[in-house]
Amino acid sequence: MKKIITLTMNPVVDKDTSVAGIVPNKKLRCATPAYFAGGGGINVSRALKKLGGDSLCMYLAGGPTGAHLQHLVAEEGIEQEVISIEGWTRENLSVTDTNTQLQYRFGVPGPKVKNEELLAILTFLEENLQFDDFMVVSGKLPQDVPVDFYVEISKIADKKNAKFILDTSGVALLPSMKANIYLMKPNLGEFSTIMGVPSISVLQLDTLAKKFLETYKCKVLVISLGAKGALWAHGNKLEHIPAPTVHQESAIGAGDSMVAGIVHSLSNEKSLGEAIKYGVACGTAATLHTGTQLCNKEDADKLYEWVLGNTRKERKKTPKLI
């Protein structure tokens, strides 16, 4: 059976709390915090579990926060492969002001990673990645990791005839374009960076998507467009998938949920078109909940039916800018 391995290079323990009024120079009494395992690949594995799928969740972890992270992942019943590191796993803080319903998110950089710790990742994948598996790499790189490290991962996937799926940003984004990619899912801002333009209009999007596939070794491009859904391109095919209009509680984890929906569908032998439609449904489903709860299957399945019914009814009127 096709295996799904997710890799998170810079995981995090997300700490969420709330307070009635955020003001400076005053001790604020916060609510009891909730903790979530976070980071791109971990979120993909969490969403896959919610959709009824399984994956091997691989990530770096160290220190007391790393032990806490392992506990959080285990609590969700997710199989994990932990690469131990000397540095401490980071912890981010989100605080919601209940007076205004505004959320304040505080992120910190990840730990430094040693060469021998990176080698442990490559060695594990050399020994465990198999033919036609899905290798999902999602998230930013931590400190002191070569910016083209994801290219090294893609070389192993190539050797094993596995499908390399990439969703990254930051310093790793442009160097990763040297990889042989099966499917890439940038958002519009990341796609603009890759194509070297400050912004992209609706009229430019199709042309630039085709240019991307001609320029880079990538079979499938899926550009997430937030509330407007997604555009995907493969060979000569281009298709816009509209997203259902919903009341959004949070956009956190929407992209990771989209990736999870796509991979879950592909691993169950669905077509590319079906998989990406389900991915849009999963990304939208994630926005229905606060914090980092991600999508759930019931919401995703209902929204998928809407997407299927509306894909052929593309709206003729679109805004000038996305």
Image (cartoon, rainbow, N blue to C red):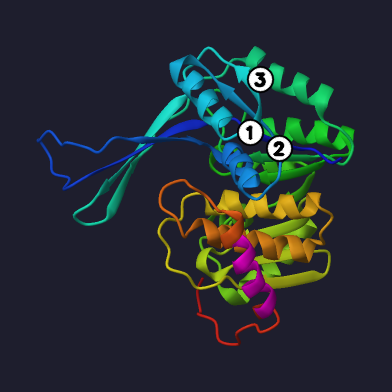
- The answer to whether residue 121 is visible is yes
Measure how far apart labels 2 and 3 are at the Cα level: 21 Å
User: In the rendered image, which quarter is residue 298 located in?
Assistant: bottom right
Whether residue 104 is situated above or below residue 312 in the rendered picture: above
Q: Which residue is mark 1?
A: 78
Residue 133 numbered mark, or none:
none
Give the residue displayed 72% in from the left and 45% down from the top. Answer: 165
Type of residue at label 1? Ile
115 over 182 or under it: above or below = above
Q: Main secondary structure of the magenta part?
A: helix
The residue that disc 3 covers is 118
For the residue pair 130 and 308, the one nearer the viewer reads as: 308
Q: Which residues are magenta?
A: 300-309
Q: Secondary structure at mark 2?
A: loop
Q: Which residue is mark 2?
A: 55
- Residue 80, located in which quarter of the rendered image? top right
Residue 133 x %, y %? 83, 39
Q: Are marks 1 and 3 in contact (CB under 8 Å)?
A: no
Cβ atoms at labels 1 and 2 below 8 Å apart = yes
Decide if residue 217 is in sight here: no
> Horizontally, is 105 left or right of 110 in the view?
left
Q: Residue at x 59, y 23 (%)?
A: 60
Q: Residue, x 78% and y 26% (percent of image)?
A: 125
Q: Nearer the viewer, residue 227 or 304?
A: 304
Give, as a three-letter code, the residue at label 2: Ser
Q: Residues within 10 Å of mark 2 (few under 14, many from 20)?
A: many
Q: Say above or below: 113 vs 253.
A: above
Residue 156 shown left or right of residue 229 in the figure? right
Magenta span includes 279: no
